[in-house]
Amino acid sequence: MKTLARFNRTILIAMLWCGWVSALTSDALAGRDLWLVLAMLAGASFLQWRLGVGVLALGGLVAGAFFSAGPLYLAWALLFVILAVLALMGGQVSFNGPVPRGALGRLIGLGLSMTFGIILLGALLFFLLPRTARTAYQHFAPRQMLVGGFGNQVLLGRLADIKRRTTPVLHVRAFNSDGQLPTLKWRGTALREFDGRRWWTPPERGRALYPEQGLIRVADDAQRWRAGRRFAYEVHQQYVSADVLFVAGTPEFVQTTISPLWRTSEGALRTGLANQDGIRFGVNSFLDGARLDVSPLAPETRLEYLKLPPLDPRILALARQLRTPEAMERYLQTQFQYTLEGLGTSVGDPLAYFLFDRRAGHCEYFASAMAAMLRAVDVPSRVITGFQGGQFNPYSKWTVLRAADAHAWVEAFIEGRGWVTFDPTPADPNPVPVSWSWMYMDALDTYWRDWVLSYTLDQQLTLAARLDGLRLDLSTQWASRASWAALGAAGAIVAMLLLWRFLPSIKRRRRPATEAARLYEQMLHQLRRRGVEKPPWMTAAEFAEHLPDTPWRPAAQRITQLYSGMRWSPHQPEAGAEIRQLLKQL
């Protein structure tokens, strides 16, 4: 009885621990409420009210559902279900005497079998029932998990903290045979105002774009009829605090469930939804080709992209010396070094310090320096923030762009060509590596996101269509495989008959169920180790009489006598204790 009570209490404490660890593994709760959970775990060993412990454990699991969106939560949830089933079963089982040998093992086996059935039924219901709401995680995503720095402003040095993180931000897949993409820049926000320390863009709602036949047309007719290379791709954007969509090339059409989409004067695509996470959209973009006849900027617009704060005279002199955008880009790429290390000290003019003292920095320093020098020589310019590069994941077939791939570059307005991209930042000599284990975890997270978090009615219908197609394939091939199917069915029937024939003998070989028989079987096992085997035709009493004259013979005969008493007179609990003592002597 003590063993069963200890088992039940252990299961309850483990269930409480499992429920709250599922929440503590998220960035939102880690280290914040640890003292509360430890207090509950300590108090759980003294709680006799099983329902109270169960409610506390379930509360932790529910909290984890709100704050944990990764596949690790699924592992904790499955473990919680197993422990909950064992706790419910253990609470209903009671013994008047000592717990029989092997009872806990059989209880655990039965609990695992029931858990498998629960999980199987739950999975079927999840994939078959209609989708009626979006994932709750999208509404309760903690701000600690979001990647900032891509809103309407960027402080010099801010992107360094972001580029040290390996959080996946964009998952991109091309609509071609293998899904791979070339190395591209994923444009987010264009910033035009500069005060010497930060770039920003005044808030602008932009022009509303509404879907037409399921597609949002972004480009005008001149762009759409432009000759050149185009490509289509799908993007899943997550963990971004800004409301901007990151796109590559010149977007012409966008397919998304968000309506309307807002296009700003700088060409940014905004959703109008703050801290929106888990956005999925498709884009048809123009990559390169024939040039467009671009009209000059309006005078007031041109002035907006030429405004400068008071600059160090050396910056103005360097800009006049380099003069052209190409020369500025080449100078910064070849004469400076890339580093993520901060300035280490507070300086009055970070741009001048970067150009003439330190001569090392990261992307927003290079982009800011080039944009400022372009404006100094009367070339309209702006700083662009987004991502660059990415790593193709061969396990999920998606290209992954992490927070470490965050980037800033420059767009300069060239007469007759329009806004032209320049990237003065040299290559990073120490890129954040991507291990194969990280790729495996990202692929697992992708499948979890696609088939659990973002599982929609469209995916449900697609899965049903695939299953129906499989059924049709099997039905059309049935006639040609009828003979093999008949042979397989006959073999299955023969196997069932043989199993039915030998099942009684298998059952007879199982260990006896009563406590008296189990104790007597232990004695026979001890005697077999001494070379004494009981013939099957001999009774227990006869076998005891024919035992060899050895020091252990009296103990074996006494065990036989007690066994007979327990077998025919069950109300002898003291006999079992005496037999166990004698077995120790053997």
Image (cartoon, rainbow, N blue to C red):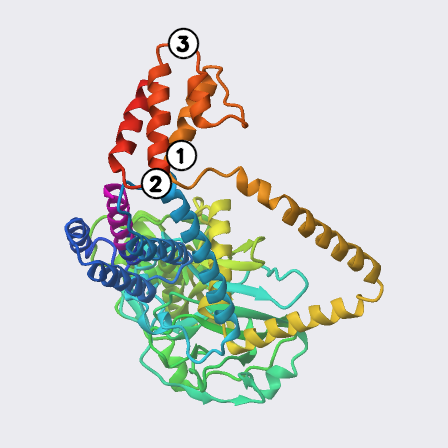
Q: Amino acid at mark 1?
A: Arg
Q: Are marks 2 and 1 in contact (CB under 8 Å)?
A: yes
Q: Amino acid at mark 3?
A: Asp
Classed neighbour count for the residue bearing mark 2: other residues with Cα under 10 Å, few (<14), some (14–19), many (≥20): few
Please tell me which residue lies in front, 177 or 108. Answer: 108
Classed neighbour count for the residue bearing mark 3: other residues with Cα under 10 Å, few (<14), some (14–19), many (≥20): few
Q: Which residues are magenta?
A: 1-16
Give the residue at mark 3.
Answer: 549
Mark in front: 2 vs 3:
3
Mark identifier at residue 100: 2
* Mark closer to the chain start, 3 or 1: 1
Please tell me which residue lies in front, 372 or 31. Answer: 31
Q: Does the magenta-highlighted stretch encompass residue 5?
A: yes
Q: Quadrant of residue 372?
A: bottom left
Please tell me which residue lies in front, 583 or 127. Answer: 583
Q: Quadrant of residue 196?
A: bottom left
Name the residue: 49% across, 68% down: 236
The quadrant of the picture occupied by the C terminus is top left
